[in-house]
Amino acid sequence: MALSVSDLPAMYTLLANSLSRDESVRKPAEAALAQSENRPGFCSCLMEVITAKDLVSQVDVRLLASVYFKNSVSRYWRNRRDSSGISSEEKIHLKQKLLSHLREENPQVTFADVMYIAFGPMQIALTLAVLISKIARIDYPKLWPELFSILAQQLQSADTLTSHRIFLILFRTLKELSTKRLTSDQKNFAEISSQFFDYSWHLWQTDVQTILHGITALVQNTSSNSEHHHDDLYLTCERWFLCSKIIRQLVISGFPGDANSIQEVRPVKEVSPLLLKAIQSFLPLLTNTSLQEEHHKFGNFLKRSCTKLMKILVAIQHRHPYSFGDKCVLPVVMDFCLNKITDPGPERMSFEQFLIQCMSMVKSVLECKEYKPSLTGRVMDENRVSLELTKKSISNAVAGVITSLLPSDRVVLLCNVLIRRYFVLTVNDLEEWHQNPEYFHHEQDSVLWSEKLRPCAEALYIVLFQNHSQLLGPVVVSILQEAMKGCPSSVTDITPGLLLKDAAYGAAAYVYYELSNYLSFKDWFNGALSLELTNDHPNMRIIHRKVALILGQWVSEIKDDTKRSVYCALIRLLQDNDLCVRLAASRSLVFHIEDATFSEKDFSDLLPVCWDLCFKLVEEVQEFDSKVQVLNLISALIAHVTEVIPYANKLVQFFQKAWEESSGESLLQIQLLTALKNFVVALGYQSPICYNMLLPILRSGLDENSPDELLEDSMLLWEATLSHAPSMVPQLLSYFACLVEILERSFDYLKVAANITESYIILGGTEFLSMHASSVAKLFDLVVGNVNDRGLLSILPLVDVSVQCFPMEVPQLISSTLQKLIVICLTGGDDYDPSKTAVKASSAAILARILIMNTNYLAQLTSEPSVLVLLQKSGFPVEENILLCLVDIWLDKVDNVTSIQKKMFGLALSIILTLRVPQVLDKLDQILSVCTSVILGGSEDLTEEESSSDSMSSSKPVFPSKEVRRRQIKFSDPINQLSLENSVRENLQTCASLHGESFNSAIGRMHPAAFAQLKQALKMP
């Protein structure tokens, strides 16, 4: 039943009760609202509550109504099959109502970031703006074409508050629409840009002057002004900030990126210089103390605005590099950023976010591929040649500008400033390290470079060094030598010299790949780095951490004669008293263990202490990232060292405890499953010693209630466990039913599932089949006919080996699957599709095997009415015996199969000779031709397989592996024991006795050469 105006009082009461602290009042109200969500008129009632003038003071109720409104739009605006949703009439009413309620009152605005205010009328306005943007994403332009024209019309006569609200709606809506990627959507966005850009840009320029004059007056006359008198200025600041974001959206998304189009984007040259000018006007105001004290909100606004404007410039450069490369844009912006980095001014320490954006700009320009000469080959398209020449011309011009902005002395200065100023640890850094070493390690190690000043400086330094390695190589070595000379390894006080050495070590670590041309690692290690580790003073943790970093980064430059010393150094660092140093050492040790030149010989005697240190470290760390990092080291050790079994008991205890403590931490459990897989592989056929720990973990990962993200790694662990199991144990045997459940949900892991199934067939044997016969049949039937050719090719070998191992039992179990294989063989074209050819050939080989090993069953199967029905549904006209139809497939695909399958085809064809149907004689020539060629040409491959099996069996391990058993099964295949020569000879005699003179006539029609070869193959006189 639809809700109406008469339900408004009840709706208000429910909303008010939902805010109650009394659970007995709140819960029923929330339940009633949830039941009303999908009723017609629900959103209209909420809209009336939001806009009711007599409820203006009830901000909390109106805010809750706006949230329910937004959520209902998200759920029900699009038509849904399970709900009537919102009717077209109600949608029209709601859209009209929303656009008529733009001026959400703000009686007492205090300035704050519009995106982060969490209460009051401002939050209602924000929620409504988000709501309009969600509707616009669905309805604009087809069902809401008037949206932007109404907003534009109301902007013309709007006061500050109303225009602020409209800009809030515009920003949210543009942000939503800019994410739509269809060509038609991008064209619509371009039209919106042309409609709003001029007005928005004009208002931006007007507001920036108003803000500058207002704040200047404020700081010059602080005594007579109160915060209340500046409400309008606050609101103007908010509107201008929104306008800046809108300008960004219009310039970034309203025009195609010029890197592809080479079309100049006019607003880039118009907007960028004025954005920079605004920054230059705002920055001097920040030095005024009143903006840091009584008017700190305006001070925060200026900082936020400078950061945002520079961020917009970075985004514009990234989107439109060629237009940004204009002589009126790039030189002034780049020069300003370089000056700010090298001489940031007094506000630097409290204004790091702005400096990060300046560094991001310089980094973006230095690594911009559009500003580098392109090496293009010969292009036949003349238009393409013209385009590439235009790009090359612009690139060369911009490259010249960058070179003029960065002469050698400025590059050297920038490098020095980055290392000596921004790489150096601050007092706050050291205090944070002292308070929480783990957090400090991960913040320095894993934080996004664009979020913190030091990582950003490091990222800029790396790009600068890449561009000027020959110039800066000697410079960095000089700084390194100066730092080491100024602070010997015996110094323990935290002096500027020690902090500079830490910074210089970092600089040398980050660019190891280029710096190795100017610095010998062996000399550096023996002459300085190893000496640093002899000083155990607590303050030396600063240098020890950086030494650990260097040893990891320089791994590719460490030669054989130094490896042993480096391994010992890392083990020593792994014993450091400081947790941050130990974590850095553990990460670097992983690099060495996983390195292709890792020397296990040099590391072997360090293994016992290394294992103990790993177990100790994992006990001490608390952070999730720390546990993952130590687990990576343990996993690397398991995977790359051969001596794992002596430590198996400790590892079992570790994994048991780690899994119990990781409950609910899926990412950590994924790492544990990966490490467990490595552990099982390392143990090999002694893996049962860990089954008490392993199998319950494996079972929990396979459980349908376990998190989906654990399934892939659990299946890989399952596969490894079976592949390295010396025999099948009851617990593992019982897990097979899980595989069918997994495949019923998804075929994503079909390849792994096929390997697991093969292991069960090979290891489990008769016991497996007797326990899981129905599951095997269900699995094959589930896959065949429901997956693509690639999936079929992974499962058909399993069908074949099942029939080989259990020729009398399996065919009857999988009759439904076999019927599908018959259909696959007889239908569908494959002349131009190798995968389909392979599927047909493999399917035909399975049916041939059944004919050989269980002749009566295949004859019975091919005569069943259900097979005829399937073939008719597939469009195959059944005009003759289905077995004879299969003969054509065996004849046709004999050249597309392996040697053993060729023999199967030959044996199957020889059996066909015994059929009591005259049509056999029509195919006699072809059948005998194929059999002859198989007899005369197939022995070499078979001999090779037998010899391979013989050599394998002579060196088999005590516990036969899955691979050994697979080869044993292959070698013991009854097909190998059968003589095609004898079969053809005997069945020819049977055929002759069945068909008499007709047989003689058919033989007589054979080509003399073919008949001679047949006699040779059958050793007939």
Image (cartoon, helix red, strand yellow):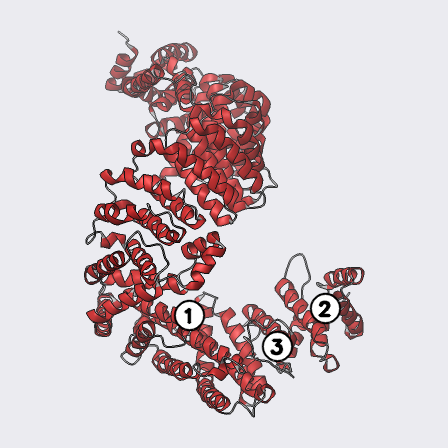
Residue 166 quadrant: bottom right
Of 357 and 931, the residue lying toward us: 357
Q: Which residue is label 1 attached to?
A: 352
Q: Which residue is label 2 attached to?
A: 42
Image depth: mark 2 or mark 3 in front: 3
Residue 103 in view (yes/no):
yes
Q: Which residue is label 3 attached to?
A: 122
Mark earlier in primary sequence (2, 1) = 2
- Disc 2 residue type? Phe
- Disc 3 residue type? Met
Find the distance from the CA under tag 2 to the CA under tag 3: 23 Å
Image depth: mark 2 or mark 1 in front: 1
Residue 759, given in percent of the width and then of the height, sits at 47, 26
Q: Residue at x 57, y 32 (%)?
A: 696
Find the distance from the CA under tag 2 to the CA under tag 1: 48 Å
Q: Give SS at disc 2.
A: helix
Q: Give SS at disc 3.
A: helix
Residue 257 in view (yes/no):
no
The answer to whether mark 2 and mark 1 are in CB contact below 8 A is: no
Residue 172 left/right relative to 96:
left
Q: Residue at x 66, y 69 (%)?
A: 69
Determine whether 118 is above or below 1008 in the image.
below
